Amino acid sequence: MIPNWRRLLAATALLTSTTTVTATTDAAAPSNNDESILHSELASQQNSSLLWGPYRPNLYFGVRPRIPKSLMTGLMWGKVESFQDFQNTMRYTCEQNEGMKGYGWDEYDARNGGVQTIHDKGNGLTLTTSFVKVPGGRNGGNWGARVKGVLVDPEQRTTVILYVTQEGGGRLEAERGEEKRGYEGDVVLSGESEGLGGYKLVVTKGEGERPTSTHEISELEAWGEGGRTTVQSLQYPDEQIWQAKPIVFRQLKEQVDWLVENKYDNAEHAPPVWQVFTLQNRPGKGNVHIVQKVFKGDFEFDVLFSSESAGTELKSEDLTREIKAGSEEFGERFGGVFALKAPFNADKYKKFGRSMFSNLIGGIGYFYGQAVVDRSYAPEYDEVDEGFWEEAAEARARHAEALEGPHELFTSVPSRPFFPRGFLWDEGFHLLPIADWDTDLALEVIKSWFNLIDEDGWIGREQILGAEARSKVPQEFQTQYPHYANPPTLFLVVEQFVERLLNTNGTAAVHKERLSQSESLANASLENPEVGLDYLRKIYPLLRRQFQWFRKTQKGDIKSYDREAYSTKEAYRWRGRTTTHCLTSGLDDYPRPQPPHPGELHVDLMSWVGLMAKSLSNIGDALGFAEDVSEYRTILDAIEHNLVDLHWSETDGCFCDATIDDFEENKLVCHKGYISLFPFLTGLMKPDDPKVGRILALIGDEEELWTPYGLRSLSKKDALYETAENYWRSPIWININYMAVKQLHYVATQDGPHKEVARDLYSRLRKNLVETIYNAWEETGFAWEQYNPDTGKGQRTQHFTGWTSLVVKIMTMEDLEGGAKATGSEHGHDEL
């Protein structure tokens, strides 16, 4: 039923100057002018609140604003005890094999900040980086970071470098200290840029013992005697300044070369290692500033950014207060947003849940730069001939790709060390828990993604923006193709927002006398329904465009092969297949029909298109687009029928891909596994459907998909189980398991013939998944990309805090095994 939005608007109060949300039931509906003011004020506050952050997730700690070509900082450190080990101990970019026992955010909120702990076993160091934002002014306010190191060996020397850059012009200068040899006190950098206005960045003297040296070079003015902070200010081309390590090492090499030339390279005459690798003090103007400190034992210092528009400068005592307040607010709010249910409400699971969620939301980054795209539209890319994959490969080799953009993207990342960039099908799963915490942050990310859509409706499945992002990707995987699709998971999040908007009615915060600023902004589009509706009106045409692009570019062939189906239109095939992979599906090496054929039909893709049609129907209904809704429902009806007509195997008891055999006839190819479940996973099956019973039997069979640790990706009975790359050919993946848990819960809470079986499977699968992820985290300090179906151990990419963080949502789901109320969800199986 379409809600009376004017009544909702009448129940909505404007944000006050303190951004406190209240609600009334008798206020008059705001005028269009009032709504315009509200929208403008909220947009300004949202941008200010989210402007700054650790938006360089590829670094262990790097702060930047959501502004192209702007001020950026990055933290670098390493022990300086050995000439041989120095280069290997320097940390900057997140890497998989650097001797870490674990690292990541213990608590993090995108509007306030948080605390990150890095267990650097290789350096004998536990490093804590605390980050806070203090709103105020028109340029995003102030922010601060506290860097604290605790050493295993109190005698160890550690160098810590803050690498500061400013792209795109403007001014950035290190103010000179009283001493030429270095700074006894704070280091002050003053700057100005178009996006930030005037600002000051202070690196405090901090606490900790500084090593000193009596070596003769200490008498040289250029070297200094130690115990001070040094700064080198440099000028580099904008396109090079992201290369922090090469630039720092280049400056250090100049000093080493001088020492060698002057005969200081032998054991008798060599200065201490830390002194050799301490930069000479040369502060001044530049777009690169290397601020270096050397400590003996434990240390602590602050980085304080103050915007002139804020009117006040941030001090260390302010930082201390804000860190404490932010931690307290996070702890209180986390328990309310993510109320963990039995048997996962013990303290150890709360700590685990806080870490998993914080690393997901703390992995949000801002990326800017050009992308590599092949828009040659070669005829071979239509993939209409047998052997199309070979023809397409030859065409890719012939046609030159080009750089497009620059583009910008605000997105979370699957893994900071290995996948520090945006992935389209990952992002929808990322945003499901993020939207629980901060609805408007999730909407901002979705808007950023849809800002990338082209006039046809295509969004590149992997966003590799700029040279820094490309440096982490092999060249053969950098090019994006406008005929390649990817699962449209962002629709899940938009539909979830619509459901919450319909049920909030602008009154969710009535029970609170006062909300914090971050909470108010986090739910502003729910608390002010016209703002939420305005967002939907703007995003809806882009969602529809992408839906139409899918139906046009990924359509499958029914008529040419005399296939019998309810509809002659609704069939789909992923483009971009090879004999070994279907990367566009997201399931990479999952077995498909062999050899590839232009008459192939893919059941997972049809399920995704069905999910899009269902979501658009609900969104269109909320917006009052009756004609569009009728169209979507017709398409959805055809898809639901065709899933059975074209993909259901009564013999195998599951859904299968289809191909064309040697006699030009339709043939089902059944590799039982995740693919077989997709109509069920995407909510396109009614709970009393007899076929649901067959799907549940497949899920629960230990010789097929069931393991004590989660559902394996491919049946144990399949001839291709654990073969070749074995990426999606046995391992347990959390995103698909999450979808299974959600649908099992839905069937378990509906009256019908499958209720009890689904209830049992839901309870056991929920428990198995949480224990698997928790045990691996407890043992290794990391979340993992996938889990071994025989041992439950985490494997492949570590620090995979993308969709593996869905475990937080799984822990909040009701405990049916414990006798909790088992009633149907009001929204049914539409909500993921």
Image: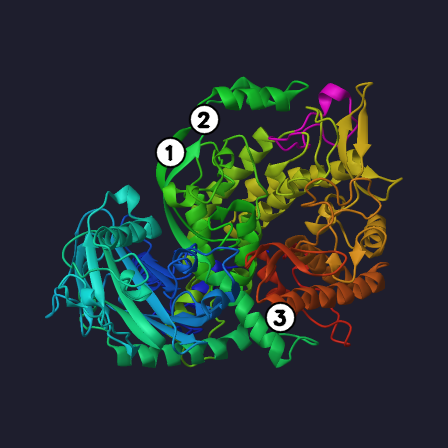
For the C terminus, the image quarter is bottom right
Task: Judge whether residue 751 is colored magenta.
Answer: no
Marks 1 and 2 sit apart, C-alpha to C-alpha, by: 10 Å
Residue highlighted by disc 2: 375
Say which residue appears at 84% left-offset and 62% top-offset.
757
Looking at the image, residue 382 lies above or below residue 260? above
490 left or right, relative to 31: right
Residue highlighted by disc 3: 778
Residue highlighted by disc 1: 404
Q: Count residues near mark 3 (Cα–Cα under 10 Å), then give few for <14, some for 14-19, many for 20+.
A: few
Task: Judge whether residue 560 is colored magenta.
Answer: yes
> Element under label 3?
helix
The majority secondary structure of the magenta stretch comes to loop
Q: Give the magenta part as a residue range.
A: 556-578
> Element under label 2?
loop
Q: Which mark sits nearer the N-terminus, 2 or 3?
A: 2
Q: Which mark sits nearer the N-terminus, 1 or 2?
A: 2
Looking at the image, residue 402 lies above or below residue 230? above
Q: Count residues near mark 1 (Cα–Cα under 10 Å), then give few for <14, some for 14-19, many for 20+.
A: some
Instruction: Residue 416 in the image: state x and y as whole percent.
Output: 48, 55
Quadrant in the picture for residue 586: top right
Say which residue appears at 77% left-offset and 33% top-offset.
646
Q: Which mark sits nearer the N-terminus, 1 or 3?
A: 1
Front one among 49 and 790: 790
Front one among 667 and 318: 318
Q: Tag 1: residue type?
A: Glu
Instruction: Residue 448 in the image: state x and y as whole percent.
Output: 42, 48
Q: Tag 2: residue type?
A: Arg
Instruction: Residue 782 in the image: state x and y as whole percent.
Output: 57, 63
